[in-house]
Image (cartoon, helix red, strand yellow):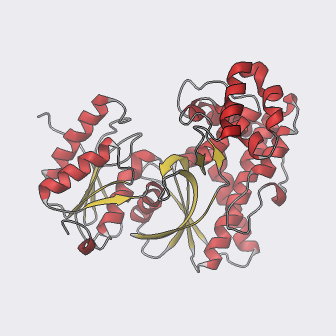
Amino acid sequence: MVAQAFTSQRVPVPAPRSVLACGAWLKNTACRLDGDHVRGSALHGDLSDPAACDALQASVQALRAFGPVEAVAHDLHPDFYSTRVAVSLAESLGVPAIAVQHHHAHIAALQAEHGLTRPVIGLALDGVGLGTDGLPWGGELLWVHGARWRRLGHLSPLALPGGDAAAREPWRMAASALHAQGRGDEIEPRLGAAHGIEAVRTVRTLLDRHLNAPMSSSAGRWFDAAAGSLGWGQAQAFEAQAAIALEQAAAQWLAGHELRVDEADAPLTAEGDLDLHPLMRRLWALDATRQAEGAARFHVTLADGLARWALQAAHQHDVDTIVLGGGCFMNRVLSTHLVQGIERLSRSQGHPGMRVRQAQAWSCGDAGLALGQAWVAAHTDLSSHPGG
């Protein structure tokens, strides 16, 4: 076997047990956590690629050779190749296999990296991760304390017409947002010329009949909806292409303009969720010459709503730290405005001590997920798990 090369890093607070974690489906990596020592694999890639699966298997076997582990951690999704690897390894070692919800793991990775031993409020924003209700999540407000966590709220959900196709063709999410607002009759006039009448009619039918259109709270799909509404709706050549175009346009516009935010564009609901439909209505009202302004408005309004949402939860739960996890925080316009918004609002509300933590040494996206899985499993009571 070819020798495996691993990164070697330390976390501020040692974990109570040794754990091996098998990572995410996309941008897969594996890691091993022993006390304060973390060994991380190279990036294997997406597990739809057989070569990535082989690389994961080789990394797991090499990490196993560093000594005994007391648990093996994996994603909540039962059908992922990484889950099968974890369960098989755990059975062979006679230790528990611990399933960790995707967004919980994102926030736990930050707790591990920053040595956060008290509860935190986490904003986990990404493209997709299986939720405990069996639906695709991705815009989550969480209370997290090691292995313990609660979902406090989520972004208002949108249907994904065509399932995974909705992540590849952002105009589908623009259509979904229109349909959710009771404006289905506008889908064809607004989107048909650019994306094909027949395709657009098919998507309208899927939405009308609730066929192959699962609901999702994904922040990534809201970025797609905004991009699709502003003219960046074509099929994507690579992951997050539309969101990147949206961010670039926003950054350029904001470099020369000021923008005032109306809180009514991203209100908090009575159920504790963040409603982005008013913001979308604002974007649809812009003419084609104000595309970049719309991109800027989406970012700044979203950041303001997220700041108010997270701070409200922090005050309600007596928490002094907000952490930002998930691939959407690779977006510098969003993350910068959000951090500034939290700091500004916390001062104005008389809570200047609120801390914000982001990924530094580890990826905020799925490439850093294995660390969060390992941290959760290391703090889980294993007595109730098979093999524990």
The image quarter in which residue 3 lies:
top left
* Residue occupying the point 22% across, 42% down: 59
- Tell me residue 338's x, y (percent): 66, 56
Query: Which quarter of the rendered picture does the N terminus lie within?
Result: top left
Q: Horizontally, is 3 left or right of 135 in the view?
A: left
The image quarter in which residue 339 lies:
bottom right
In this view of the protein, which residue sits in the foreground, 151 or 350?
151
- Tell me residue 174's x, y (percent): 72, 36
Query: Against 57, is 139 above or below?
Result: below
In this view of the protein, which residue sits in the foreground, 199 or 254?
199
The image quarter in which residue 223 lies:
top right
* Residue occupying the point 48% across, 55% down: 359
Query: Which quarter of the rendered picture does the C terminus lie within?
Result: bottom left
Q: Horizontally, is 272 left or right of 12 in the view?
A: right
- Tell me residue 146's x, y (percent): 40, 70
- Tell me residue 386's x, y (percent): 22, 66
Q: Can residue 139 be seen here? A: yes
Query: Against 143, is 185 above or below?
Result: above
In this view of the protein, which residue sits in the foreground, 335 or 271?
271
